[in-house]
Image: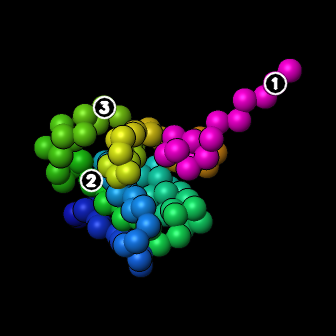
């Protein structure tokens, strides 16, 4: 089964656009959870300004080399630059937001 999905939200192209690639290995529970978590985060924080491309490395292993994928699932933010990677099922929303530069790191004083 091919799990190469291109999901694009409805968008006005006047604002910053986010191009995200999620690398998975088959339709495992961890892969499906990562996609569901990513979609939820995008719908809540990127409201129509994103595209998700899901690449199944079981079907397309050659695609791992281009983004230097070493573990799965891995999320790659292609746009806006700079390119960033987040490894895991994306269940920690706060870490994903910080990793994507959607939220600043809070440094507690004291």
Residue 28 belongs to magenta span: no
Residue 69 at x, y percent in the picture: 28, 36
How many other residues sit within 10 Å of disc 3, few (<14), some (14-19) or many (≥20)?
few
First reached walking from the N terminus: tag 2 or tag 1 = 2
Which residues are drawn in magenta?
97-110
In the picture of the structure, the residue carrying the numbered disc 1 is: 109
Nearer mark to the viewer, of 3 and 1: 1
In the picture of the structure, the residue carrying the numbered disc 3 is: 70
Which numbered dot is residue 19? none
Q: Is residue 72 above or below residue 39?
A: above
Residue lying furthest left: 62
First reached walking from the N terminus: tag 3 or tag 1 = 3
Which numbered dot is residue 56? 2
How far apart are the two marked residues, 2 and 3, measured between alpha carbons?
A: 14 Å
For the stretch drawn in magenta, the main secondary structure is loop
Q: Is residue 54 above or below residue 71?
A: below
First reached walking from the N terminus: tag 2 or tag 3 = 2
Judged from the image, the secondary structure of the residue bearing numbered disc 2 is strand
């Amino acid at each position: 089964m091919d799990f190469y999905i291109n999901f694009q939200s409805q968008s006005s192209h006047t604002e910053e656009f986010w191009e995200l690639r999620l690398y998975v290995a088959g339709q495992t529970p961890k892969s499906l959870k990562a996609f569901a978590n990513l979609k939820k985060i995008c719908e809540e924080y990127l409201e129509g300004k994103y595209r998700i491309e899901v690449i199944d490395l079981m079907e397309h292993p050659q695609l791992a080399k281009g983004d230097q994928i070493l573990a799965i699932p891995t999320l790659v933010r292609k746009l806006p630059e700079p390119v960033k990677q987040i490894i895991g099922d994306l269940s920690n929303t706060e870490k994903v937001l910080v990793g994507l530069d959607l939220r600043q790191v809070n440094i507690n004083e004291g």
